[in-house]
Amino acid sequence: MSFDRSLKIAPSILSADFANFGMECAAIEAQGADWVHVDVMDGHFVPNITFGPATCAAIRPHIKGVMDVHLMIAPVDPYIDAFAQAGADVITAHVEAGPHIHRTLQAIRGAGAKAGVALNPGTPASAVEYLLDMVDLVCVMTVNPGFGGQKFIHSQVEKVRQLRAMIGDRPIHIEIDGGVDPTTAPLVAAAGADVLVAGSAVFRGGSVTNPAPYGENIRAIRNACAG
Ligand SMILES: O=C(CO)[C@H](O)[C@H](O)COP(=O)(O)O
Ligand SMILES: [Co+2]
């Protein structure tokens, strides 16, 4: 997985048909997705439960590109190897999920994956200042984690600007997660983000038997950022 700062759309399969994950992953890639974003929730760190490493391993053969695993779980460390072995290219842990994020990031890289750190809306950009040599991606949550389809929190755009300045020319992605659509995407792209996660705004109107709307929705986000 090589680094580039071009705009990437990463549909979140949280909004996909859970009975057809494999086909949904293949469909969104065929419709222009750059990465596939996989939301793991434990009902403890966040008030919702999704799935674990076995599901990630099951969908891996259906994803040609980057599998971007967002862990909303606490503790994180006991599960890192399992998600790496499931084929995650990027594993992102929350800075709020435990007392030893530096150790967690070391463990992610040690397991052979790219290391991401996520910040909840109430966590300042400065939380990653001493982690920049440890991370490949910083994820700015623009909703409170736990559910798809929530409203974008506009105060986070300033945090993205601060992170862009802090990161400078280091090869670190800035990912935005939550409430991304053609209206909000240009705000964070202009502020310096390069990976835009979008769940409801990509999957709305489509299905595995009618995937064309996925492509239209992805293009609408991309075009809004270009315009
Ligand atoms: O991490 C997440 C929620 O915790 C999801 O990735 C995010 O909410 C995407 O869904 P939507 O685009 O519908 O907001
Ligand atoms: Co996510």
Image (tube, helix red, strand yellow):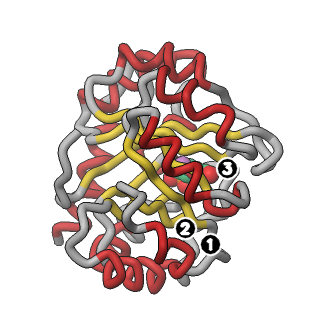
Q: Give the image location of residue 33, x and y in percent.
A: 28, 39
Q: Give the image location of residue 200, x and y in percent.
A: 51, 47
* In the image: residue 87, left or right of residue 219: right
Q: What separation in Å lies between label 2 and label 1 (alpha carbons)?
A: 6 Å
Marks 3 and 1 in Cβ contact (< 8 Å): no
Residue that appears at 54% across and 60% down: 118
Report the amino acid beneath label 2: Thr
Q: Which residue is mark 3?
A: 147
Which circle's residue, 2 or 1, is located before the other in the chain?
A: 1
Q: Is mark 2 within 8 Å of ligand 1?
A: yes
The quarter of the rendered structure image containing the C terminus is bottom left
Marks 2 and 1 in Cβ contact (< 8 Å): yes
Residue that appears at 59% across and 17% down: 54
* In the image: residue 100, left or right of residue 11: right
Q: Is any part of residue 211 visible from this angle?
A: yes
Q: Which residue is mark 2?
A: 142
Which circle's residue, 3 or 1, is located before the other in the chain?
A: 1
Q: Is mark 3 within 8 Å of ligand 1?
A: yes
Q: Is any part of residue 15 visible from this angle?
A: no
Q: Give the image location of residue 105, x and y in percent.
A: 51, 51
* In the image: residue 75, left or right of residue 212: right
In this view, 16 is above or below 151: above
Report the amino acid beneath label 3: Phe
Q: Nearer the viewer, mark 2 or mark 1?
A: 1
Marks 3 and 2 in Cβ contact (< 8 Å): no
Residue that appears at 66% across and 57% down: 100
Q: Give the image location of residue 59, x and y in percent.
A: 46, 18
**Helix, strand or loop at disc 2?**
loop
> Residue 121 bears which disc, if any?
1
**Helix, strand or loop at disc 3?**
loop
Q: Nearer the viewer, residue 212 or 85?
A: 85
